[in-house]
Image (cartoon, grey):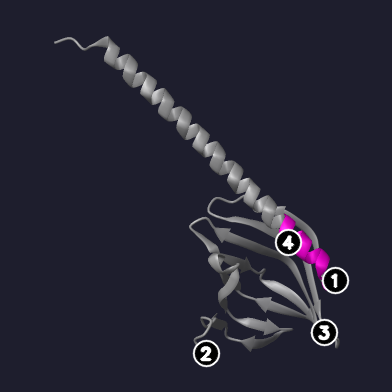
Amino acid sequence: MAADPRRHDHDGGMMRRLMLWLTVLALLLGGLWLGAESLLMREIRRYAAQDPGLQIAALRGMRQPGRIGTVGSGVEWATPAGRVELPQADLWLSPLRPTELRLDLPPGATFDDGYGAQIQSLAATEARLRLRPLAGAELASFALHSGPLTLGNEPLAQGIDMQARLAEAGSY
């Protein structure tokens, strides 16, 4: 039994249309990815401009698969309690968990409490902030985790593991 040539032409046309739609989808997702990083960088710059204690020397998009985020270099944050200097800080979110912001800190930071700068070692330090998008992006929970910490050359803590969940309105 011979194959019908019209059927193969139809299958080839369907395959071309499928490939066209997959290409359009990939371009759309790539544009959304780059647009989200650009929006995040713009908002961070706007926030830093409003807070005179926060300085960021350079800010760029992360451009990593699985992460939508920014990389800040030369980050300084001054408060009445002192000043913290970070060589780099990564702020990102996963496309699979878009309501959870993550902040990855470098292995070392400088802390100056007014009595001289101290170098602090931060091992595997990350912070997570979960937002409630349907409640005006209000804070839902916060978590901080780190490995061993040192201040100067002295051990400060074996690690930090902290979690906080905000209570629902009316439950307190």
Q: In terms of sequence position, does the residue under pointer 4 or pointer 2 come before the other?
A: 4
Rate crowding at label 2 as few (under 14), some (14 to 19) or many (20 or more) other CA atoms within 10 Å. Answer: few
Q: Is residue 91 above or below residue 82?
A: above
**Which residue is identified by label 1?**
52
Give the Cα distance between marks 4 and 1: 13 Å
Question: Regarding mark 4 in the picture, which secondary structure is present there?
Answer: helix
Outermost residue, front side: 170
x, y percent for residue 39: 68, 53
The amino acid type found where label 2 is placed reads Tyr
Question: In 3D space, how far apart are the residues under numbered discs 4 and 3 (Cα atoms)?
Answer: 22 Å
> Are the residues tagged 2 and 3 within 8 Å (C-beta)?
no
**Marks 2 and 3, how far apart at CA:** 31 Å
Task: Point out the tag, 3 or 1, that comes first from the N-terminus.
Answer: 1
Compared across the picture, whether 96 is left or right of 34 comes to left
Q: CA distance from mark 1 to mark 2?
A: 35 Å
**What residue sits 77% from the left and 60% below the top?**
45
Foreground mark, 2 or 3, reads 2
- For the residue labelled by badge 1, is the local secondary structure a helix, a strand or a loop? loop
Residue 44's label in the rendered image is 4
